[in-house]
């Protein structure tokens, strides 16, 4: 969506009146036969393609995170069932460390 904008205030050495011939030619250049802008149709198509690609990448990343979470969750569950007292001791030590850091 590249549009050229005319300055609203006149700079030094320029006239405050805008050039109507330039505005009309630029309007005809940007618009197609149906009166719609050709550049916005191209931008919209490339934008929707980019959005689609981004959604696919996010969905792939989400699946990867879900897979890793399930693997870690299952291995943790197996460890806790095999050695429950070790798991309780690690949780207690972790709680004590976090408590001492929070007390400071």
Image (tube, rainbow, N blue to C red):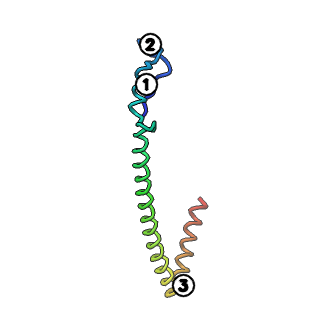
Viewer-side residue, 98 vs 52: 52
Q: Earlier in the sequence, mark 1 or mark 3?
A: 1
Give the mark nearest the N terminus, 2 or 1. 2
Q: Position of residue 79 (x, y in %)?
A: 48, 83
Q: Residue furthest bottom?
A: 82
Identify the residue at horizontal 50%, vertical 86% (top origin). 83
**Residue 15's disc number:** 2
Relative depth, front residue between 68 and 81 = 68
Name the residue: 39% across, 26% down.
25
Q: Seen from this angle, which residue lies furthest front? A: 33
- First along the sequence among labels 3 and 2: 2
Tell me residue 9's x, y (percent).
49, 18
Residue 34 in the image: x percent, y percent?
44, 38
> Element type at marker 2?
loop
Give the residue at x 47% y 71%.
66
Task: Categorize mark 3 by other alpha carbons within 10 Å: few (<14), some (14-19), many (20+).
Answer: few
Label 2 CA crowd tier, 10 Å (few <14, some 14–19, many 20+):
few
Image quadrant in which you'd find residue 1 = top left
Alpha-carbon span between mark 1 and mark 3: 82 Å
Q: Residue furthest right?
A: 103
The residue under label 1 is: 24
- Left or right, residue 57 beside residue 95: left
Which dot, 1 or 3, sits closer to the camera? 1
Whole-Å distance between the Cαs marked 2 and 1? 18 Å
Q: Is residue 48 above or below residue 31?
A: below
In the picture shown, does residue 5 fall above or below 34?
A: above
Residue 33 to residue 97: above or below? above
**Helix, strand or loop under label 1:** helix
Q: Which residue is under mark 3?
A: 85
């Amino acid at each position: 969506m590249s549009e050229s904008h005319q300055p609203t205030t006149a700079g030094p050495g320029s006239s405050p009146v805008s050039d109507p011939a330039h505005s009309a030619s630029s309007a005809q250049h940007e618009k197609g036969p149906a009166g719609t802008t050709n550049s916005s149709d191209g931008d919209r198509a490339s934008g929707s393609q980019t959005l689609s690609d981004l959604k696919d990448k996010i969905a792939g990343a989400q699946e990867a995170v879900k897979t890793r979470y399930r693997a870690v969750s299952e291995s943790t569950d197996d460890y806790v069932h095999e050695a429950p007292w070790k798991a309780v001791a690690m949780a207690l030590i972790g709680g004590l460390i976090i408590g001492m850091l929070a007390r400071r």
